[in-house]
Image (spheres, rainbow, N blue to C red):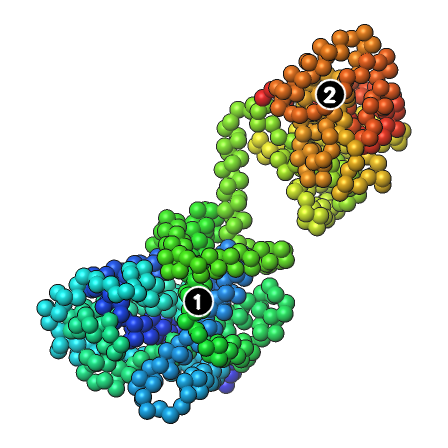
Amino acid sequence: MTNKNKSGESQPRKFGTFGGVFTPSVLTILGVILFLRYDTVIGNAGLWGALLVLLIAKLFTTITTFSLSSIATNMKVKGGGSYYLISRSLGVEFGGVIAVFFYIALSLAVSLYLVGFTEALFLAFPELDMSFIMVATLANIIVFIFVYIGAGWTIKVQYFILAIVLAAIGSYSYGAFEHASLETLGENLKPVWTANHSLLTIFALFFPAVTGIEAGINMSGDLKNPSKSIPRGTFIAIGFTFVCYAGIAILMASSTSRESLVGDGMVMAEKAWFVPLVFAGVIAATLSSALGSMMGAPRILQAFAKDNVFKRLKYFAVGSGKSNEPRRAIVITFVFTQLGLLAGDLDSIAPIITMFFLITYGTINLASFFESISRNPTFRPTFKLNHWSISLLGALMSLAIMFLVNWLWASIAIVASVTLFLIIKRAELIVQWGDVLSGYAYRRARSALLALEKEKYHPKNWRPSILSLSGIAGNRMHMVKYANLLSAERGLVSLAQIISGDLETLNKRRMEGEKLLRDFIRKEELSAFPVVVVNENISDGLKSILQCHGIGGLRPNIVLIGWSDDPEKKDSFSSILSLTKKMERSCLILRSHEEERSWENPFGAINIWWTDKINGAMMLLLAYLLKGNREWRDCPLRVLLPVALKADTENVENEMKKILQGGRIEAEIVVLPTDSPLEAVRKAMIPSALLFAGFEPSDDDPASVLLPFMEQIVDLPGDLILTYNAGDLTLES
């Protein structure tokens, strides 16, 4: 029995739907707007306009709650509220943006609520002999103490506050009902706009009232069953507060003249059955809103710090007590709140707070939208009443409301969010959770692959898919570099390593080799895929890769190999060339002066030794792609045409011009009448950064035929790429 008690005592205090979600949400929604600003809304927009504003605002938060419920019931929700939900759905970049800006918004919202509290206190006690800032500071200290003690104590206080707020609403409703008349109602049905207001400004004035749904979500880490409590408590809070606002709007329009509604008085106090109860209600409501935000902001900071996105925030990840209270984060939030009070003009930053709330809601809808359309098997929410179109509508409404409320602050908020997103993305953080974007990318890739599979191949759609036999990670950087340069971000590159031996004994080495290649690709920021196979010899390994690597229409169509003048590698070299030709793949043989070259500033021309149209077509296209890279943009493209001494050079040049025009490629044509093509090319190519030259592998012993030719040109200046076109591309397409 003793052990059980001890075990029970060690468990942190958790809250249910009513205490953890419904109560803080309702108290934030039924806040300062209801008591101090709602009369202005009805006085300008009339009853119909006020109900329209209420309906649109509630429709938006209801849609957002649909999205929220889908995400919350698809995962085990921990502390951090919206940050946790978004980061685990859209990724750490989106989550980080929400964490930073939503924390700032909530912290400054505490300051705004405390200003409202102080205003209400002075309305109730006009003879109060204290400065405004001193009262606000004392209120901030009280809120800080309540929250620092712990969420359990704060929730108990909020029960009491909820009772006061509901009593205040009841007091006003009873008094207003006694003064209600159909005549007054008829006068207040239609809008009568004052000089400073329109439907948009009234909507902007009212909208912060409905942002209270975040108060319950922010308590996610303190709930017994977040996946159940968040949807249920939030929906009930939205419905309950809608009834409250709609009912009060009807009573206010029925009992109060237009002049009083747009005047400076406090209508709810003027018509109340028991006036002190209304003052107590507005004081309690503003204080509870401050408590709700003060509880939520530190929990977001703590969850964000735990994920170690910014290492300097790690200090705030530590919790206190059995409930893991974020007391370090509470202290810094208190400091931010006090600085906000001392700043003075909080009305000027109120719009940006609203913007950050809207960005959060929009991102929640966006996360649900992507989760739905990605069709990821892991997305199995127990909340079924949602569709991707509803989430998309919520995201678009969020963006529209931002610009309707204040286009300038909306622009500032979006620019700030994008900037922070890029900063986090550049950090290339590796997190321990997946996100929906990878699932969405998978779905798009699947759809694209299936579409490619249905299409009949046409040379017009040819793209380089280069298989580079570059071996161990980082071993042959020149081959890796050229493979990426020749693909020019328009094709695919695979870096291949073939391990000679038995698969059963070398499989672990194969897996380690693939991991090293993948890490190398990430480190060098290459657009490439790793492929490592084990086979008895190089030729059989290449045969396996060419047969199996790739999927659908995305298979290697070019094999890139490095030149070696090692006589012992002649047989292997010959078999690779023979196999490549038999399997109808194009082939590039690279000889690079790696130690002499500058990858950043290549010097000289890109030369093409033109011998035939088939290989020439590939050489021209690869040269064109190479010039598409920033480093090679200034290198001139030249076509070197050795011809017989008595050849019609003018006709040869015109024919070459037609080929270039047909291929829509610009290049300088250099016709070389000569009886020694090699020497003519040697003289004409200087200065040369790279020379393309065509070749045709023989069927029997390609290396024996090719080696003598290579020995003749191996000492040509610059790099060299021997090119064989298997015939699957043409320039005219």
Tell me if 691 is positioned left or right of 52 in this view. Answer: right
Q: In the rendered image, which residue does mark 1 sit on?
A: 353
Q: Nearer the viewer, mark 1 or mark 2?
A: 2
Q: Is residue 326 above or below residue 635?
A: below
Categorize mark 2 by other alpha carbons within 10 Å: few (<14), some (14-19), many (20+). Answer: some
| Residue 616 sits in quarter | top right
Q: Position of residue 463 (x, y in %)?
A: 62, 30
Tell me if 50 is positioned left or right of 472 in this view. Answer: left
Tell me if 241 is positioned left or right of 670 in this view. Answer: left
Residue furthest to the front in view is 195
Q: Position of residue 343 (x, y in %)?
A: 48, 77
Residue 382 visible, this angle: no
Query: Which residue sits at x=17%, y=63%?
Result: 189
Q: Position of residue 209 (x, y in %)?
A: 34, 68
Rounded to the nearest angstrom, the CA distance separating label 1 from label 2 is: 64 Å
Q: Is residue 144 above or below residue 52?
A: below
| Residue 698 sits in quarter | top right
Query: Which residue sits at x=50%, y=28%?
Result: 454
Q: Report the front residue among 318 and 651.
A: 651
**Number of the label disc, if any, that sits on residue 669:** 2
Q: Do the residues labelled 1 and 2 touch (CB within 8 Å)?
A: no
Categorize mark 1 by other alpha carbons within 10 Å: few (<14), some (14-19), many (20+). Answer: many
Amino acid found under the numbered disc labelled 1: Ile
> SS class of the residue under badge 2?
strand
Q: In which quarter of the image is the C terminus?
A: top right
Q: Position of residue 76 (x, y in %)?
A: 48, 63
Amino acid found under the numbered disc labelled 2: Ile
**Number of the label disc, if any, that sits on residue 193:** none
Q: Which of marks 1 and 2 is nearer the N terminus?
A: 1
Residue 228 visible, this angle: yes
Query: Which residue sits at x=24%, y=63%?
Result: 193
